[in-house]
Structure formats: structure tokens, C-alpha cells
Image: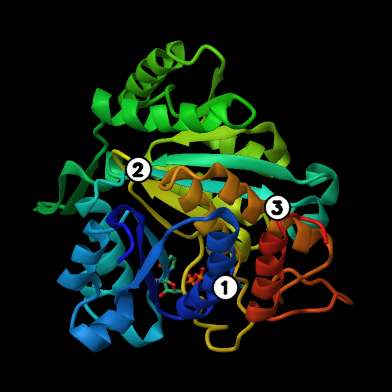
């Protein structure tokens, strides 16, 4: 058996998940050969498919599989078939949230990259995104308003009263800020903290703690932006950002907005990280039931999730870079799935584009 440390849990899930995961495995096989990686891929049940086969969205055996793995390559979960289940049993809530909790995945990394050749896929005017952009949203994932106590609805004399609480402690801010600064050190060396320091106590603490982390990273520039202004700047000039660091709620919104201006959800990977090198890697989009089973989904988000996995959980930046080069090369040479093609451009299917990317990985070059 291959070494325990190199086991990857593969959880394809629902909708387009199995299609884009299958396509990604074509790239993975070439990557293993090219870079001499010794990986053991182990499939597990998750999401609606797991509800159907095993009675729950995150079976215990899947949790055990993830525990035994170096990283999880996750597809997507959910779909109309399971929408009428009670909210707590629905695939996304009953699979992804517990996985994040069990593995303490507190940092969510969402790169939003617009390739110069795909500028016309962005909803923004080409003048605003000429040349494309490459930014990274780092979102705190396990704290803030979504988890803070009290969180309750009570009856009052005049109706009802609902409370959510935004709480952050120093260590929660410090660890995710470290992730952001480390990421920036491999990029354009700039971290921007999006907050509401004009109105929120938690934002004042974020600024204080993040300044402290910045002091340990003198090569990285730190600046601040109010979250509402960040939303505006993302549509005015997304190229001005390098790493955008956010607490949970602002990160939820700003990472989706960054994804929207980058064109297609089919291009965007994500990583959720905790302590150590373990991580969960998945496309930014969902299970896309509208196109599932048709062989037209864009597998690039899943393929680039594998690149993030190589970099962050396996310590294989060269393998990651060879995937990114292969993707960029295929895009440059005009390979387009339906979500990327504009009038007159030839469309290719999920398998076709993945085979082209795999071929380029095998050749070891973006061009070709
Ligand atoms: P979605 O991301 O699945 O789809 C939104 C749009 O983007 C659709 O038109 C879809 O066709 C398109 N799209 C997404 N990925 C694509 C790809 N790889 N290639 C081409 N087009 C792509 O979001 P939704 O429609 O709001 O949700 C559908 C289901 O997915 C729901 O059940 C939801 O709960 C689930 N979901 C799961 C995750 C997850 O597993 N992490 C995340 C979001 C939504």
C-alpha cells in the first residue's frame, strides 16, 4: 500500500461533482507520473449520494477516510432531489459544515483569477479588467456572526426578537491573518484587510491583531479598506487587490462578488485550511444541477483545486504550477467549455478539455 501520508480522500458528491472529479483524475494521473508523486486516491460517499446510499450526508466511514488522509479533494453536494429534507439534513449543511468543524478548517482561500483571454466572460466592462486580474480572498471560516453566542429568537410583548452575535478572539484572527500573509509572500506581497472599523468593535480588534501579524512580515504591505468600499472597488478595479483578508460574513459576500467579476464559477477553486498541512479543496461553485449529466461542465475549478492541494497539503509547488501552466496554455489556445465560449467560439466538453490539460501536464509545458 502507498504511504499513509500521501492518501487523498476523493469525495465527488452530487450533480456535476462526479463528472468534474473524473476529469480531474485524468490530470492527476499524468501529474503523478510527471512529478513522481506517490499518491493513493480513496473515494468516499458524501452529500445527497451518501444520503441515498448510506442514510446520511456525511457517513462515519467518510469522516474516518478523511482522518486517514493528507487532504480531501471535494466535488460538490446538493441538488433538487434533497431540497425538501429538513435544513439540518440537507447535503451542504449536513456534510460540509461538519467537515469544516471536525477538521478545524478556519481559513478559506478563494482565488479569483480572470485570464486575459477570458476578459469577455467578466460582467465588467473590458476597460476595467483589461489584462485580467488575479486576487485571493482569505476568509475566516469558523468564527464571527455565524457562530457567536447568543444566537436566538425570543418572544417579546411586541412580536419577536432575534439576536446574532459577532465575537472574535485574538487567536482566531491571528491564525487566519498568518495564512493571508504567508499567501501574500508568494504573490504580490500585499494584504488588504476589509472591515468596518468605523462601527464595529470586532473590526478594531482585527486591525490591532493584523497589525501585529504584519510586524512579523516586513516584506508584505498591509492596508485597510471598509468592507462596503471593498465591494465597490471589486467592480471598479479588481486588479488593485492582491490578498483580501476578511472576517467570516464580509468574506462570504466579498469572495462571491470576486468570483462573479472573474467570469465563470467553473474556473474558480478554493481551499479550506486548518492547523498543519491538512486541507479540503473544492470548486467555488456548487453541484450545478442545471447542467449535470450532460458532459458540458467546466472541470477547471476542480483541476485547479488539485493544484492548490499539491501546493498547500503536499508541499509540491512545482506540480501545482505545472497544472496552472497547463490550464493557462489550454485557455490561451482557445479551449472553451460552454460557460466560457462566446458567440462563434468552438465549445468542448468536460472530458475533452481535461484531456487537453492532462496532455499539457504530461508534456510539462503550458504551450503546445
Ligand atoms: P451552482 O454553483 O451549482 O450553479 C450556479 C450557476 O453556475 C449554474 O448556472 C451552473 O450551471 C453554473 N456553474 C457552476 N459550476 C459550473 C461549472 N463547473 N461549469 C459550468 N457552469 C457551472 O449554484 P446553485 O445553482 O445555487 O446551487 C446548486 C446546488 O449546489 C444546490 O443544491 C446548492 O446547495 C449546492 N451547492 C453546493 C456547494 C458545495 O458543495 N460546496 C456550494 C454551493 C452550492
Label 3 belongs to which residue?
325
Q: Which residue is denoted by mark 2 in the rendering?
A: 277
Give how far apart the Cα atoms at labels 2 and 1 are.
24 Å
Q: Which residue is at a point 27% across and 31% down the rendered structure image?
A: 172
Crowdedness near tag 3: few (<14), some (14–19) or many (≥20) residues, C-alpha within 10 Å: some
- Ligand 1 within 8 Å of disc 2? The answer is no
Relative to 304, residue 111 above or below: above
Residue 197 in sight = yes
**Relative horizontal placement of residue 228, taking residue 331 as reference (left or right):** left
User: What residue lies at 28% left-to-right and 44% top-to-bottom?
Assistant: 142
Quadrant for the N terminus in the image: bottom left
Which circle marks residue 26 in the picture? 1
Q: Residue most toward the right?
A: 344
Q: Residue at x 44, y 35 (%)?
A: 246
| Residue name at image x 30 percent, y 39 percent | 276
Marker disc for residue 353: none
Q: Where on the picture, by quarter, is residue 164?
A: top left
Residue 14 vs residue 254, the one in the foreground: 14
Q: Secondary structure at mark 1?
A: helix
Amino acid at each position: 500500500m502507498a504511504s499513509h501520508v500521501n492518501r487523498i480522500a476523493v469525495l465527488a458528491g452530487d450533480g456535476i461533482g462526479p463528472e468534474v472529479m473524473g476529469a480531474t483524475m485524468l490530470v492527476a494521473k499524468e501529474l503523478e507520473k510527471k512529478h513522481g508523486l506517490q499518491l493513493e486516491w480513496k473515494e468516499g460517499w458524501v452529500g445527497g449520494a451518501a444520503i441515498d446510499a448510506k442514510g446520511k450526508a456525511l457517513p462515519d466511514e467518510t469522516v474516518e477516510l478523511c482522518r486517514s488522509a493528507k487532504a480531501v479533494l471535494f466535488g460538490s453536494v446538493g441538488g433538487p432531489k434533497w431540497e425538501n429534507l429538513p435544513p439540518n439534513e440537507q447535503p451542504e449543511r449536513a456534510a460540509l459544515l461538519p467537515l469544516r468543524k471536525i477538521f478545524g478548517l478556519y481559513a478559506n482561500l478563494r482565488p479569483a483569477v480572470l485570464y486575459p483571454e477570458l476578459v469577455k466572460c467578466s460582467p465588467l466592462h473590458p476597460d476595467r479588467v483589461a489584462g485580467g486580474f488575479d486576487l485571493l480572498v482569505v476568509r475566516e471560516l469558523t468564527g464571527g456572526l455565524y457562530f457567536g453566542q447568543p444566537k436566538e429568537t425570543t418572544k417579546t410583548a411586541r412580536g419577536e426578537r432575534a439576536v446574532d452575535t459577532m465575537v472574535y478572539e485574538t487567536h482566531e484572527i491571528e491564525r487566519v491573518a498568518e495564512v493571508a500573509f504567508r499567501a501574500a509572500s508568494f504573490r504580490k506581497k500585499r494584504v488588504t484587510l476589509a472591515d468596518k472599523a468605523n462601527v464595529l468593535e470586532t473590526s478594531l480588534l482585527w486591525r490591532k491583531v493584523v497589525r501585529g501579524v504584519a510586524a512579523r512580515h516586513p516584506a508584505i504591505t498591509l492596508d485597510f479598506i471598509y468592507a462596503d468600499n471593498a465591494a465597490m472597488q471589486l467592480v471598479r478595479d479588481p486588479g488593485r487587490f492582491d490578498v483580501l483578508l476578511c472576517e467570516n460574513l464580509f468574506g462570504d459576500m466579498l469572495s462571491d462578488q470576486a468570483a462573479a467579476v472573474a467570469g465563470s464559477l467553473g474556473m474558480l477553486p478554493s481551499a479550506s485550511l486548518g492547523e498543519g498541512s491538512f486541507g479540503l479543496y473544492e470548486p467555488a461553485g456548487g453541484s450545478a444541477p442545471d447542467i449535470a449529466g450532460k458532459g458540458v461542465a467546466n472541470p477547471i475549478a476542480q483541476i485547479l483545486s488539485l493544484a492548490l492541494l499539491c501546493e498547500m497539503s503536499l508541499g509540491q509547488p512545482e506540480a501545482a504550477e505545472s497544472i496552472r501552466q497547463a490550464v493557462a496554455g489550454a485557455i490561451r489556445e482557445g479551449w472553451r467549455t460552454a460557460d466560457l465560449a462566446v458567440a462563434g467560439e468552438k465549445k468542448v466538453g468536460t472530458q475533452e478539455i481535461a484531456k487537453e490539460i492532462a496532455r499539457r501536464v504530461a508534456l510539462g509545458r503550458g504551450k503546445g
